[in-house]
Image (spheres, rainbow, N blue to C red):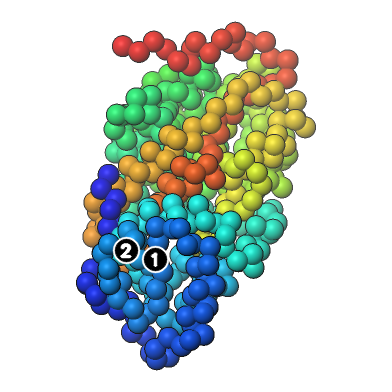
Amino acid sequence: MNSSRIDPLGVSGKSCSTGSSSGAGSFIGDPTQMDRWLLGQLTSGLDDSKVRMVLWDEPVRANRNMLPVTVCIGDRGGLFQMLRDPALYFGDLYSSGRITLDGDLLVLLDEAYRFLDKLPKTSRWLERTRVRKPGLSDSRNNIHHHYDLGNDFYKIWLDREAMQYTCAYYAQSSMTLEQAQQAKMHHVCRKLQLEAGDRVIEAGGGWGGFALFMAQNYGVHVRSFNISKEQITFSREQAQARDLGHLVEFIEDDYRNISGRCDVFVSIGMLEHVGTPNYRQLGELIARVLTPEGRGLVHTIGRDRPMPLNAWIARRIFPGAYPPTLREMMDIFEPNSLSVLDVENLRPHYALTLKHWLERFEQHADVVRAMFDESFVRAWRLYLAGSIIGFLHGDLQLFQVLFARTGANGIPWTRDHTYPPRD
């Protein structure tokens, strides 16, 4: 992917002032001595960084031989916000164009991760915030905010065959996005040892691609639950078009209302929205619906240690989301007689998945801009790029946890079925 110059200012030697003359974010004349002192405080830990940060009166390309990335804060209000909480306000300032940059956004974000510990301590108070317990209405609002942006938007940059908005599996690093998403779905199905006739309950079905894949390739019966109206509508249309309605039922309802019995329970990319206070309840539900020899798998973004999602992403992109640690995930299993059989971390695979998504997003940025606006394009560019760096640095993980009922003896002796011989 050609990620260089993702979002340059584009005019050599021009100052980066936003030109705003009113509102809380406006600047008043040239930077003062105090403004420059404050900038010095903001950048005090970045002496050996690849990033140069300047104020609104300075040219962003004064010396092309200086540093690969120049960041310009376009007004005094933006400077104050960056000092107050850069993790929260950088995203808003960048999205609105009040922060501009000359250079590679990925390089900037990579540097931000390396120097995170050197930021002013007052800017890191959000790490101490507690995780809320989302209720049913909270979950509906959060899902609507992110997933109901329109199916046409996600079609632009997700894989074209199954619209998988989750980590792909690159059995070979040269795989295309489509090949890797197909490999991911086979990987999960083999772990679950799906057999024709199995009854599967899926919690959080996305655009229905995985449910349809299971039915078409493994002959199982799937009931897939989702509270995104846009996704459910699309999923039902796909089931009808593929003549799979007799094997797959898409139900517009919350996971808390799942009932019936199943041989397999699977959740791909939903746990991030559940909230740790609801994990025991989710585990009780799984224990209630699984047959005695039932098995299941949870695929989720996670962390090595408890901490909230990035403040800006939590507010603007993924409200209510929380990536759990493995220890926190055990609240699903331990109280409910569910045995963990296997844990796999696909962190590098998600970084590569996101690189493919960002590449396609950039290729169609003009289309996205016409759908929404420039601020939306910049916000989602930052979200995808920031996620790449998060997985590369290990701040984010991708856990697949395989489990069964305690005492179930139909579990495999080896992992041979998960990794079949390559052709």
Could you tell me residue 381's position as x and y percent?
36, 57
Q: To which quarter of the image does residue 411 belong? A: top right
- Disc 2 crowd, CA 10 A, few/some/many (<14, 14-19, 20+): few
Q: Residue at x 40, y 77 (%)?
A: 55
The residue carrying mark 2 is: 66
Verify CB contact (< 8 Å) between mark 2 and mark 1: yes
344 on left or right of 125: left
Observer-nearest residue: 37 or 6? 37
Q: Which mark is residue 363?
A: none
Please determine whether, in this image, residue 140 is positioned above or below residue 17. above
User: The residue under label 2 is which amino acid type?
Assistant: Met
Could you tell me residue 378's position as x and y percent?
36, 63
Q: Residue at x 28, y 72 (%)?
A: 62
Observer-nearest residue: 312 or 282? 312
Q: Which mark is residue 52?
A: 1
Q: To which quarter of the image does residue 423 belong? A: top left
